[in-house]
Image (tube, rainbow, N blue to C red):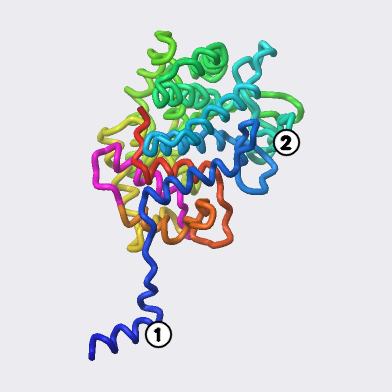
C-alpha cells in the first residue's frame, strides 16, 4: 500500500514522467532520415528546414558523414544513394574554370537551381568568404567514404579531377608552409584576402581529406601532408593552461586560448575522434567529461545552453579513445533534442531551437558508432 501511495505521489508531482529515451539506433537512423528529408532530386541538402542557404561553412558535408554512418550500420541503399547525390551536387558547385580559385567552393549557396553562390558574412567587416579549407578537404573525404562503403570506385574515379583540384588548391593557397592550413579567403571592401588563422578542428578536416586523397589516388604529396598534421596537431594545438585544445592558432604561431563558445568546445571531441589517443586528446576528453551534467548534457561555459553537438562529439571521442560511450549524454539527446516526429536534432534543449543538418550528421555518427577511417 505504501509503495502504491509513493508511486501515486510521484505521478501527481511529476517526479516520474515515465519518459524513456529512444535507443541510439533509432535516433541515429532517424537523424539520417531527417537529412534525407532535406535533400532534393538534385542532391542538395538544406542546412535546416526553411533555410535560405546550402553548405554554409561545410554544413552539408558534415551532414553527409551522418548518411555514411547510417549506411554502414544499416546497409540501406537510400543512405548511400543520398551520399552519392550529395557528392554530385557538390562537384557541380566546385570552381574548375578560374585558375585562381580552381578546386574551391564559396562559403554558401542558394537553395534553388541554379544554386548560385550566396554572399554571406562569416564575421564583422567581412562581406563573403570562399576557399574554406574544410570544404575542399571534406569533399574528398566523402568520395573516400562512398568508395569504401560501396566497394565501388566508379564515383571516386569520375570525380578524380575534382578531388585533386580540391586538395591542390589547399596545398597551393591555404597551406602555411609548415604543417597546417589557414581557414579561408574573405572578401572585405571588394577585395579577397587570405584569413591566416588556423582553426584546430579544421586541421582534422584537412587531414581527413588529404588522407582520403592518398588512399584514393596514391599521391604521396597528400599522404605526406596528412602525416605531418596527424603527427603534430594534438601537441601543437594543445593549451596546457586550460587542459584542452585551443580554438586555433594566430598568424604569429601563438595559440588562441580565448573561449569562443561552441568553436572552442568542438575540437575537444572532434580532434580525439579523428586522430585517436594521445596525451592531449585524453586531457581534452577529460575536460569534456568534467563539464557533463547529471542529465548527460554538457555545460562548458557560463550560460552554455547545452548543445546537442557537444554531447555528440563527446560520445564520438569516447569511442575513438576506447572509452565507455557516455550513454547519459546520448540519452539526453534522445530525450531532450531529438524530434521523433521527423528525426531532426534540435541545436539545444530549447524546443524552439533550429534543427541543423550538420548536427543531425554528427548525431548519427555518435549514435551509430562511426569511425573516421
Element at label 1: helix
Where residue 6 sits: x, y (%)? 28, 86
Answer with the quarter of the image where residue 188 lies.
Answer: top right
- The residue where tag 1 is placed is 12
31 relative to 2, above or below: above
**Is residue 35 left or right of 193 when viewed as pictured?**
left
Q: Which mark is residue 112?
A: 2
- Circle 1 Cα neighbour tier, 10 Å, few/some/many (<14 / 14–19 / ≥20): few
Where residue 158 sits: x, y (%)? 54, 14
Q: Is 313 inside the magenta-drawn segment?
A: yes
| Of callouts 2 and 1, the N-terminal one | 1
The span shown in magenta is: 303-326
Report the residue that reaches farthest toward the bottom: 1
133 relative to 28, above or below: above
Element at label 2: loop
Residue depicted at x 37% and y 81%:
11
Answer with the quarter of the image where residue 275 lies.
Answer: top left
Nearer-the-camera pick, 272 or 196: 272
Quadrant into which the C terminus falls:
top left
**Is residue 256 left or right of 120 when viewed as pictured?**
left
The tally of labels here is 2
Residue depicted at x 24% and y 43%:
323
Amino acid at each position: 500500500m505504501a509503495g502504491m501511495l509513493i508511486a501515486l505521489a510521484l505521478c501527481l508531482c511529476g517526479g516520474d514522467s515515465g519518459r524513456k529515451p529512444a535507443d541510439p539506433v533509432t535516433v541515429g537512423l532517424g537523424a539520417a532520415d531527417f537529412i534525407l528529408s532535406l535533400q532534393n532530386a538534385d542532391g542538395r541538402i538544406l542546412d535546416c528546414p526553411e533555410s535560405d542557404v546550402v553548405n554554409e561553412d561545410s554544413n552539408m558535408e558534415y551532414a553527409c558523414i551522418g548518411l555514411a554512418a547510417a549506411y554502414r550500420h544499416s546497409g540501406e541503399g537510400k543512405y548511400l544513394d543520398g551520399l552519392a547525390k550529395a557528392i554530385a551536387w557538390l562537384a557541380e558547385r566546385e570552381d574548375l574554370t578560374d585558375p585562381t580559385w580552381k578546386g574551391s567552393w564559396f562559403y554558401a549557396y542558394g537553395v534553388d537551381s541554379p544554386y548560385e553562390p550566396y554572399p554571406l558574412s562569416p564575421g564583422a567587416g567581412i562581406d563573403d568568404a570562399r576557399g574554406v579549407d574544410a570544404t575542399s578537404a571534406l569533399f574528398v573525404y566523402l568520395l573516400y567514404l562512398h568508395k569504401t562503403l560501396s566497394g565501388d570506385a566508379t564515383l571516386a574515379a569520375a570525380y578524380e579531377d575534382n578531388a585533386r583540384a580540391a586538395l591542390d588548391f589547399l596545398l597551393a593557397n591555404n597551406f602555411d608552409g609548415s604543417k597546417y592550413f589557414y581557414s579561408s579567403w574573405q572578401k572585405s571592401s571588394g577585395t579577397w584576402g587570405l584569413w591566416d588563422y588556423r582553426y584546430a578542428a579544421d586541421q582534422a578536416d584537412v587531414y581527413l581529406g588529404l588522407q582520403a586523397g592518398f588512399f584514393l589516388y596514391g599521391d604521396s604529396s597528400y599522404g605526406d601532408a596528412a602525416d605531418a598534421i596527424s603527427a603534430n596537431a594534438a601537441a601543437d594545438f594543445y593549451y596546457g593552461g586550460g587542459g584542452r585544445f585551443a580554438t586555433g592558432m594566430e598568424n604569429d604561431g601563438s595559440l588562441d586560448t580565448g573561449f569562443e563558445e561552441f568553436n572552442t568546445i568542438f575540437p575537444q571531441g572532434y580532434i580525439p575522434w579523428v586522430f585517436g589517443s594521445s596525451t592531449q586528446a585524453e586531457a581534452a576528453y577529460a575536460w569534456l567529461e568534467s563539464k557533463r551534467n547529471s542529465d548527460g548534457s554538457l555545460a562548458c561555459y557560463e550560460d552554455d545552453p547545452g548543445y546537442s553537438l557537444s554531447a555528440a562529439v563527446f560520445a564520438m571521442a569516447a569511442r575513438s579513445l576506447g572509452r565507455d560511450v557516455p550513454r547519459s549524454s546520448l540519452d539526453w539527446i534522445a530525450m531532450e533534442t531529438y524530434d521523433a516526429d521527423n528525426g531532426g536534432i534540435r541545436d539545444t534543449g530549447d524546443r524552439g531551437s533550429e534543427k541543423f543538418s550538420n548536427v543531425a550528421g554528427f548525431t548519427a555518427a555518435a549514435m551509430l558508432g562511426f569511425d573516421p577511417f
